[in-house]
């Protein structure tokens, strides 16, 4: 039952350096970039106060990064072909590091937004190129273990981001959220220059033709779509003409981009790689994974801060044990993959994720820190069963010449779906809270004997503290209303956990449409 992917047609080329040192070096770059997408979130209130702007204005520091990042992701393989993958990767690391420093010394919001755009532009080239370098550095039989290392950057970094960001901001300054990238970036750039080399087929693939139309349509689509996702909640979604315009531009741009990229002889990114069934299913799997990962990760800190009164650092600490659980389980999954069909592990991961999310619906208004940690750990553990198997299955039948485009698209699906997951979960929280408030408030009527009795008992307790009768009644009503809001919010979180669980369960049958990973000799695995 041993499995591995079929060997690639690489002419026997292998890098001169130790492949595991190469994997560590390129993964450090990806970890730095992924961490930066979540570490800034908790610093936004501090940024707003320091730069004398509103919180809503400060969120453009996040929006600008995400927009630039999402634009570059699908076309990063093109830049790698034009500049050479190693050269482009080093440029991205160096520029990302420099922009991080500039963000840290920004004296006003305009400067910060400009530097964040630049940081996102160069950061967008890190994850896809890291994946492509992993694919070329390791033979197919070893990619499962290599992707286990990648999973630490992809899965653990978003979980640790709020914790690290909260601690740095509370202990030092929000500026150190950016300064921390400088030593890591310098070390990583030196390691990549020393260890990484372009394989022969990448050197031969360099081409100079530029698909201006394709690039323009991608910029239009992802800029409009990311702005819609990031600003939709504050603008009340489609009740805003601005959000409707962004949605329309994104839809028109997406249709036009797909049509052009399929028509063009030399497109900026080759969508034909999606004809590969395993890769298309892999992109769907990683998108589903990202929606659940990012959507659920943002809920627990939000619940802890808004309903339980936790500080940003304490709310982040709720997530940390979950990250340790992921790190513990990833090697175990790597050991199991040679003996169990990879698609079965993926199916098991989605099923366990659904179970963990259903367990999360046991939250209560008086839940303590320990049970909140256990709840998050139950959500986090199945993530170890998802990323590595999905990556191995997605790339196993992709032709070598399309691996760069495949890595760019795979990363794009994950990141865009992650943004969708965050926006979707926060929107559902707001909507379902209003629905539950409307339902529960129907019971707060003088015609309801239970409500009258509870209100009278609470007012009596307040009068016993020395308050006047009229004041006690008002205080009792105010306390009841606050309880109503808390309970409605808690029910809304339970709804989102249920929806995420149903999404996880729904993808389980699709995992069996993957072709089994093949043995090294070429025979299908069992």
Image (cartoon, helix red, strand yellow):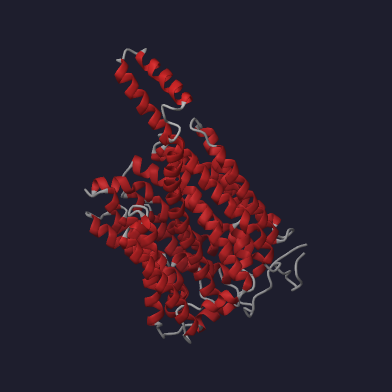
- Quadrant of the rendering where the C terminus is positioned: bottom right
Left or right side of 496 for 4: right
Q: Nearer the viewer, residue 86 or 349?
A: 349
Residue 243 appears at what percent x and percent y? 34, 61
- Quadrant in the picture for the N terminus: bottom right
Q: How many marks?
A: 0
Q: Position of residue 125 (x, y in %)?
A: 43, 68
Give the residue drawn at x 60%, y 73%: 14
Rendering quarter of residue 337:
bottom right
Does residue 440 appear to the left or right of 140 in the view shown? left
Task: Reply above or below: 370 against 97.
Answer: above
Q: Is residue 18 visible?
A: no
The residue positioned farthest toward the front in the image shown: 447
**Which of the two residues, 64 or 245, is positioned nearer the viewer here?**
245
Q: Is residue 445 visible?
A: yes
Vertical order, 217 against 371 (above or below): below
Q: Position of residue 116 (x, y in %)?
A: 32, 60
Q: Residue at x 48, y 43 (%)?
A: 492
* Residue 344 % position (x, y): 70, 58
Q: Can you say whether 452 is above or below 113 in the image?
A: above
């Amino acid at each position: 039952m041993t499995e591995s992917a079929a060997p690639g047609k690489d002419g026997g080329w292998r890098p001169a350096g130790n492949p595991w040192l190469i994997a560590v070096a390129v993964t450090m770059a990806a970890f730095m970039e992924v961490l930066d997408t979540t570490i800034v979130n908790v610093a936004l209130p501090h940024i707003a106060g320091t730069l004398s702007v509103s919180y809503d204005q400060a969120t453009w520091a996040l929006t600008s990064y995400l927009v630039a990042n999402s634009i570059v992701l699908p076309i990063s393989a093109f830049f790698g072909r034009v500049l050479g993958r190693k050269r482009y990767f080093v440029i991205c690391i160096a520029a990302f590091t420099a922009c991080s420093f500039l963000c840290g010394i920004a004296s006003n919001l305009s400067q910060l937004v400009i530097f964040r755009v630049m940081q996102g532009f160069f950061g967008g080239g890190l994850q896809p190129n890291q994946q492509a370098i992993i694919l070329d550095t390791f033979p197919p039989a070893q990619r499962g273990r290599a992707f286990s290392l990648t999973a630490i950057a992809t899965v653990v970094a978003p979980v640790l981001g709020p914790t690290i960001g909260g601690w740095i901001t509370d202990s030092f300054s929000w500026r150190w959220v950016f300064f921390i990238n400088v030593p890591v970036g310098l070390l990583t750039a030196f390691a990549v220059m020393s260890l990484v080399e372009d394989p022969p087929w990448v050197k031969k693939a360099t081409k100079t033709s530029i698909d201006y139309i394709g690039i323009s349509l991608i910029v239009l689509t992802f800029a409009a779509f990311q702005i819609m996702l990031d600003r939709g909640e504050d603008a009340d979604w489609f009740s805003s003409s601005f959000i409707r315009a962004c949605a329309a531009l994104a839809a028109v741009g997406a249709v036009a981009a797909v049509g052009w990229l399929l028509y063009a002889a030399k497109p900026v990114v080759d969508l034909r790689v999606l004809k590969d069934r395993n890769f298309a299913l892999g992109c769907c799997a990683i998108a589903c994974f990202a929606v659940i990962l990012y959507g659920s990760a943002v809920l627990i800190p939000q619940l802890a801060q808004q309903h339980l009164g936790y500080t940003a650092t304490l709310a982040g600490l709720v997530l940390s044990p979950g990250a340790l659980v992921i790190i513990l389980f990833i090697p175990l999954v790597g050991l199991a993959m040679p003996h169990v069909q990879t698609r079965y592990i993926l199916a098991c991961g989605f099923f366990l994720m659904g179970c963990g999310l259903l367990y999360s619906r046991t939250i209560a208004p008086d839940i303590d820190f320990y049970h909140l940690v256990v709840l998050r750990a139950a959500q986090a553990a199945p993530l170890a069963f998802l990323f590595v198997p999905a990556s191995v299955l997605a790339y196993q039948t992709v032709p070598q010449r399309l691996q760069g485009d495949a890595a760019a698209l795979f990363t794009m699906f994950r990141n865009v779906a992650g943004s969708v997951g965050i926006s979707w979960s926060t929107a559902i929280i707001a909507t379902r809270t209003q629905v539950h408030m409307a339902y529960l408030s129907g019971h707060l009527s003088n015609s309801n004997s239970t409500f009258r009795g509870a209100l009278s008992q609470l007012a009596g307790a307040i009068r016993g503290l020395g308050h006047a009768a009229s004041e006690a009644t008002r205080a009792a009503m105010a306390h009841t209303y606050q309880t109503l809001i808390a309970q409605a919010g808690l029910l809304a979180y339970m709804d989102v956990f249920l929806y995420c669980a149903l999404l996880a369960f729904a993808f389980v049958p699709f995992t069996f449409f993957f072709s089994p990973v093949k043995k090294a000799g070429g025979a299908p695995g069992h």
